[in-house]
């Protein structure tokens, strides 16, 4: 009987009752197929349809669990191209996938880092790119986890950016730094890719080139948003912090701007990018953050991706609608009928219900697809409306910024007028400021002098230390000589003891030889006696007694010989002991000598170290003096461009005297330099000459600038330029003294030529009154005072004409401001007139009190220096009145 129970389990598992599991299996199968087709070892770009299926899968399951479950199993260490494509797909998934993808990727940070580190240690072209790409992905994940208000796609409104930055300047500063780091990683990847595209791979239509270029589309999308956000944040920072504090930020932004502009330009010239993406063009120059109105000129770079799909890819539905289960069910029913035969004219109600439900599901899926397509059209229309509204808002913002610029210009004009009013008050304080500067200069000179004295004292202490070291060296040498003398004495004593022992040994041997001779003689006598005994046996008793006597004498002689031998042995032992003691003493003396030689060598090393330290100290003292001299010269050169120094004047005679003194200091400087090269342990002369040279040269430059303020235009420009060249040559010479190699060849000849030029210009600028006879000085004083009074009267008249003209041409606030300015000028001219009248009266009193019975002309002739100063002062007053008008 054919029933459902007789159907095999494999067939039952495919029935429609398990549709959810089948859908899940189909989803996993589709994702696995897309991942395997997108991430492979083929050197070709990732196809958009496979990446799109993976991204849709993240939205379908609201995360990247399935993606990572398959990605973990990929053999990334085996192929650099496989790892490169994996990074590309992961970048697209992060940008366009479900928001939960970010959290899922955070769990696999270690896997990404290990892949990058592995390929970073290998010398593979793709491997180096993989290392850089993984660092970019890790930076991207960290940034978006730390700042959740920025989605991985980086597309937020300006209001969200303002909210994310907040009002705390520290947070804005930190966010800007993090965006700079983000942008650096993006640009580093693009630069590495373009660096690998050599001339043989320059055609962007090659698949190998496109494999490298494809991820740069995501980089372009990221960089366009990051550039816009950094510009906004930089303007916000410059409105809160001073410009000097943000110099590092500006330098880093300008460097990124140049790199990004080159990247966009090079990418836009490639045919591969032209058909896939529209790359914006950046402005020719970076925004000027020091000007707040420049924000209105900033245009947000917008990247446009064409909506139509490429020709080689088929259009896909947003949601895949598969008819596989229906076809599979049909195949299952056919197999069922072939295997078990048709049912008994009856079909199960559940099968009918399942078929009806499947048809309804198919209809619902079709409707759902239509609804989603319509929703997509609505979304595109709304996006177009949003873009147009954003363009309108941007235009309104530009108009607002222009209005702000106009307000700033009006405010600047008002401030300029207020500054012009305050200039009159400031001119009164210039004299006090000049006095303060002079006192400050004198204080600095005193401090430098004290420092010079301290350097001299330290040099004296070093010399004393050197003398002590020399004394210790002499003491060590004396002790060494004494040890040598003791050694010689010991050697002499040792030789004497040897001689004495040898003499005693010779005496003992002589005595032994004598005893042996006596013994032999006795033996001979005994033999004779024995012979005589044999001859005459009769006299036996007498001979026996003699023999006994001789025997006892023989025994005593034997005892004497043994005693002498014992004495000889003891003498030899004493000699050996003496020799052992002498050898031990000699070894001890040798060790003492070696120790003393070691101490002597150590003393020599200490002396060399002290000598080297002395040289280093002298060189450091010289460097300190050089730095201070550079500071003095730089301060003098800076006064050439100081607007407060314009009102300072000087006479050509004083400039000549300063230039001559500076030339004399160069001679002393050359002598000190020669002495230092001869003996580098003593830099006293060079340090003193440097200090004198710096002060006199700086004084010459300052007085040259002050003299140029009263000189004719040509001479003034030439004098200022010569002063600046003199300062530069002096700084170049001082810079040569900083290095021990260039110190040998340092020559102040160029500085001398500049000072001689200043001296010549001062001589050319000397007043012509020195060539006039002293009898004519009185007439010149009267003429100059009269011309000065006339200049002041003419200035007063012209100011009154300007006041009348201002009353006619202007009205309201402008008239009030002009009247205030002209009234201030009138008051100033009155003060100058009063000053001239007072100086004239004072001059008359001085002449009358000093001339006695002589005439004023004779008094002027006698006091020619004072007269010349009076003429120069009168000229300055007249020139000032003319310039004021």
Image (spheres, rainbow, N blue to C red):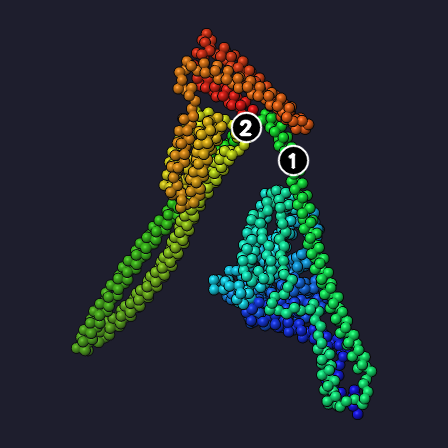
Give coordinates of residue 139: x percent, y percent: 62, 59
Q: Which residue is mark 1?
A: 410
Image quadrant where residue 272 sits: bottom right
Q: Residue at x 32, y 63 (%)?
A: 572
- Work out whether residue 601 can be spotted: yes
The earlier-in-sequence mark between 2 and 1 is: 1
Q: Is residue 579 left or right of residue 882?
A: left
Q: Is residue 631 left or right of residue 180?
A: left
> In terms of secondary structure, where does tag 2 sit?
helix
Label 1: few (<14), some (14–19) or many (≥20) C-alpha neighbours in 10 Å = few
Distance in Å between CA atoms under marks 2 and 1 = 34 Å
Confirm or deny contact between disc 2 and disc 1 (CB under 8 A): no
Q: For the residues carrying marks 2 and 1, which lies nearer the camera in this image? A: 1
Q: Quadrant of the N terminus?
A: bottom right
Q: Is residue 474 left or right of residue 846?
A: left
Q: Residue at x 65, y 35 (%)?
A: 410
Q: Residue at x 27, y 69 (%)?
A: 553
The residue nearer to you, when weighing 526 against 536, is: 526
The residue nearer to you, when weighing 832 against 714, is: 714
Q: Is residue 348 above or below residue 138?
A: below
Q: Which residue is mark 2?
A: 434
Give coordinates of residue 36: x percent, y percent: 62, 72
Q: Residue at x 72, y 57 (%)?
A: 382
């Amino acid at each position: 009987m054919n029933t459902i129970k007789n159907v095999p389990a494999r067939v039952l598992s495919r029935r429609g009752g398990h549709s959810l599991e089948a859908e899940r299996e189909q989803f996993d199968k589709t994702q696995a197929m897309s991942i395997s087709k997108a991430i492979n070892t083929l050197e070709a770009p990732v196809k958009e349809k496979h990446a799109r299926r993976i991204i849709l899968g993240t939205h379908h399951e609201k995360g990247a669990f399935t993606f990572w479950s398959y990605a973990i199993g990929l053999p990334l260490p085996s192929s650099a191209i496989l790892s490169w494509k994996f990074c590309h797909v992961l970048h697209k998934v992060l940008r366009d996938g479900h928001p939960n993808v970010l959290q899922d990727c955070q769990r696999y940070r270690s896997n990404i880092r290990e892949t990058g580190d592995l390929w970073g240690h290998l010398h593979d072209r793709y491997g180096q790119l993989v290392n850089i790409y993984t660092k970019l992905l890790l930076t991207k994940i960290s940034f978006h986890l730390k700042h959740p208000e920025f989605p991985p796609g980086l597309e937020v409104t300006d209001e969200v950016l303002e909210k994310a930055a907040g009002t705390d300047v520290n947070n804005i500063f930190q966010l800007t730094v993090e965006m700079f780091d983000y942008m650096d990683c993006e640009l580093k990847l693009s630069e590495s890719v373009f660096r690998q595209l050599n001339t043989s791979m320059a055609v962007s239509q090659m698949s190998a080139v496109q494999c490298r270029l494809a991820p740069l589309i995501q980089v372009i999308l990221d960089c366009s948003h990051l550039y816009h956000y950094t510009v906004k944040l930089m303007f916000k920072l410059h409105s809160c912090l001073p410009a000097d504090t943000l110099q590092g930020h500006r330098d880093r932004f300008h460097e990124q701007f140049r790199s990004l502009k080159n990247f966009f330009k090079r990418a836009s010239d490639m045919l591969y990018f032209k058909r896939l993406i529209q790359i914006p063009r950046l402005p020719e120059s970076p925004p000027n953050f020091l000007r707040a109105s420049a924000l209105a000129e900033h245009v947000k770079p917008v990247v446009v991706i064409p909506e139509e799909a490429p020709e080689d890819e088929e259009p896909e539905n947003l949601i895949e609608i598969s008819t596989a289960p229906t076809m599979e069910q049909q195949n299952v029913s056919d197999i069922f009928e072939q295997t078990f035969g048709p049912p008994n004219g009856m079909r199960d109600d559940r099968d009918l219900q399942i078929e009806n439900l499947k048809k309804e599901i198919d209809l619902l899926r079709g409707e759902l697809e239509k609804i989603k397509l319509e929703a997509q059209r609505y979304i595109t229309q709304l996006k177009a409306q949003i873009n147009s509204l954003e363009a309108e808002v941007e235009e309104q913002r530009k108009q607002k910024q222009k209005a702000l610029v106009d307000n700033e210009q009006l405010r600047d004009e008002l401030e300029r007028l207020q500054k012009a009013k305050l200039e009159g008050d400031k001119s009164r304080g210039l004299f006090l400021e000049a006095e303060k500067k002079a006192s400050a200069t004198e204080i600095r000179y005193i401090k430098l002098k004290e420092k010079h004295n301290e350097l001299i004292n330290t040099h004296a202490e070093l010399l004393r230390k050197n003398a002590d070291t020399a004394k210790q060296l002499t003491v060590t040498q004396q002790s060494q000589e004494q040890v040598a003398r003791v050694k010689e004495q010991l050697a002499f004593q040792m030789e004497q003891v040897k001689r004495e022992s040898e003499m005693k040994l010779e005496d003992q041997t002589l005595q032994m030889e004598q005893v042996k001779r006596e013994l032999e003689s006795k033996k001979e006598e005994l033999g004779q006696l024995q012979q005589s005994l044999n001859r005459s046996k009769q006299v036996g008793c007498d001979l026996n007694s003699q023999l006994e006597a001789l025997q006892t004498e023989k025994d005593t002689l034997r005892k004497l010989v043994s005693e002498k031998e014992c004495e000889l042995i003891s003498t030899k032992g004493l000699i050996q002991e003496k020799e052992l003691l002498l050898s031990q003493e000699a070894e001890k003396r040798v060790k003492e000598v070696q120790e003393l030689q070691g101490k002597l060598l150590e003393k020599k090393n200490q002396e060399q170290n002290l000598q080297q330290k002395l040289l280093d100290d002298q060189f450091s003292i010289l460097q300190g003096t050089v730095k201070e001299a550079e500071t003095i010269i730089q301060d003098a050169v800076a006064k050439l461009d100081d607007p407060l120094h314009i009102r300072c004047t000087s006479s050509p005679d004083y400039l000549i005297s300063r230039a001559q003194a500076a030339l004399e200091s160069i001679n002393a400087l050359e002598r000190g330099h020669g002495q230092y090269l001869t003996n580098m342990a003593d830099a006293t002369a060079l340090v003193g000459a440097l200090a004198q040279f710096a002060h006199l040269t700086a004084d010459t430059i300052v007085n040259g600038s002050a003299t140029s303020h009263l000189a004719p235009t040509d001479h003034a420009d030439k004098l200022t330029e010569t002063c600046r060249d003199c300062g530069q040559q002096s700084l170049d010479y001082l810079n040569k003294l900083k290095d021990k190699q260039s110190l040998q060849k340092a020559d102040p000849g160029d500085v001398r030529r500049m000072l001689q030029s200043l001296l010549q210009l001062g001589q050319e600028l000397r007043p012509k009154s020195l060539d006039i006879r002293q009898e004519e000085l009185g007439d010149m004083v009267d003429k100059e005072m009269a011309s000065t009074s006339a200049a002041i009267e003419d200035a007063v008249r012209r100011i009154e004409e300007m006041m009348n003209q201002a009353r006619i041409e202007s009205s309201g606030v402008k008239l009030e401001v002009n009247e205030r300015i002209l009234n201030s000028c009138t008051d100033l001219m009155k003060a100058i007139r009063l000053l001239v009248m007072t100086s004239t009266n004072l001059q008359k009193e001085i002449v009358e009190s000093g001339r006695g019975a002589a005439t004023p002309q004779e008094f002027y002739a006698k006091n020619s220096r004072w007269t010349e100063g009076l003429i120069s002062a009168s000229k300055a007053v007249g020139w000032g009145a003319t310039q004021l008008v």
